[in-house]
Amino acid sequence: MKYIKYKTKDRTGYITLNRPEKRNALNAELVNELKTVFLKAEEDSEVKVIILRAAGKVFCAGADLEYMQNLQKNTFEENLADSKNLAELYRIIYTLNKVVIAQVEGHAIAGGAGLATVCDFVFSVPEAKYGYTEVAIGFVPAIVSFFLLRKIGETKAKELLLTGKLISAAKAKELNIFNFIESAKNIETAAYKFAQDIIKNASEDSLTLTKKLISDIQALDYAKAINFASEVNAMSRSTEDCKKGIAAFLNKEKISW
């Protein structure tokens, strides 16, 4: 791949944005490569958890503005297709049946903030700035708005989306966008250890079903949500992981996932 590096280690898939000379800015080719590699990692039997990171000093500066300028010559239909391409990437990450951790070691701006937002967990260095800055250039943070509203609620989402202001990593953690702040020296080890804890202590079937539950249940009314939760509960009982886990617990055996 031209803009993405992929490797596996200890059941962890590492996806690295590798366009540092452009601050890992998003264009159609990079978005397509990300979609391809996330789906590859999802099917990789050697991978249970995925870490998304970036080469260079910036995690992702958002859309490549030169690329965006060229898109302005396109028809509405062509721009809609390009927009749906990014939306599909966010959807893939958000609904992937494996846990995705963002390892943010530099600024995450606009579409870059979106990439981190849709991940299940976010580790950040304290120096990183974060923001949905689209309104500052006459653009709209349209696609990410859906995920941000789910994550932090309307009041705080409006504050970020309508002002376009940059915030610190500490503020992003306070708003529940980030999970953990780690120094540049420690972040790689911290993200790795966190991934390993999930890998060793959680059933893969359970992770998949729980992610689906969290993703789907929020759009349902009370009656449908309870029914859906009951179905997932019942479904989980028949998985091999559940049978294995309960048997190990009752037999006082240490289970290896």
Image: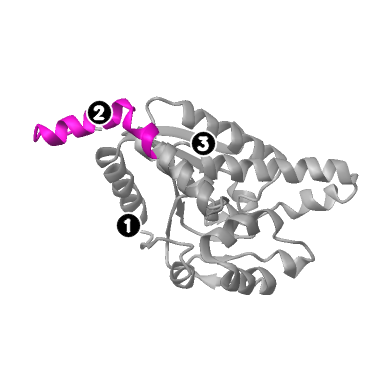
- Give the Cα distance between marks 1 and 3: 22 Å
Percent x, y of residue 90: 60, 46
Percent x, y of residue 183: 36, 63
Q: Is residue 252 left or right of residue 53?
A: left
The secondary structure type at the circle numbered 2 is helix
Q: Is residue 176 left or right of residue 82?
A: left
Type of amino acid under label 1:
Asn
Observer-nearest of 231 and 193? 231
Label 2 close to label 1 by CB (< 8 Å): no
Give me the disc on residue 186: 1
Q: Is residue 21 visible?
A: yes
Mark nearer the viewer, 2 or 1 = 2
The secondary structure type at the circle numbered 1 is loop
Magenta residues, dominant SS class: helix
Type of amino acid under label 2:
Lys
Q: Would you identify the image quadrant in which residue 39 lies?
A: top right
Q: Which residues are magenta?
A: 233-255
Q: Which residue is drawn at the image coordinates 56% and 53% (left, top)?
A: 221
Q: Which residue is drawn at the image coordinates 83% and 53% (left, top)?
A: 69
Give the mark nearer the N terminus: 2 vs 3: 3
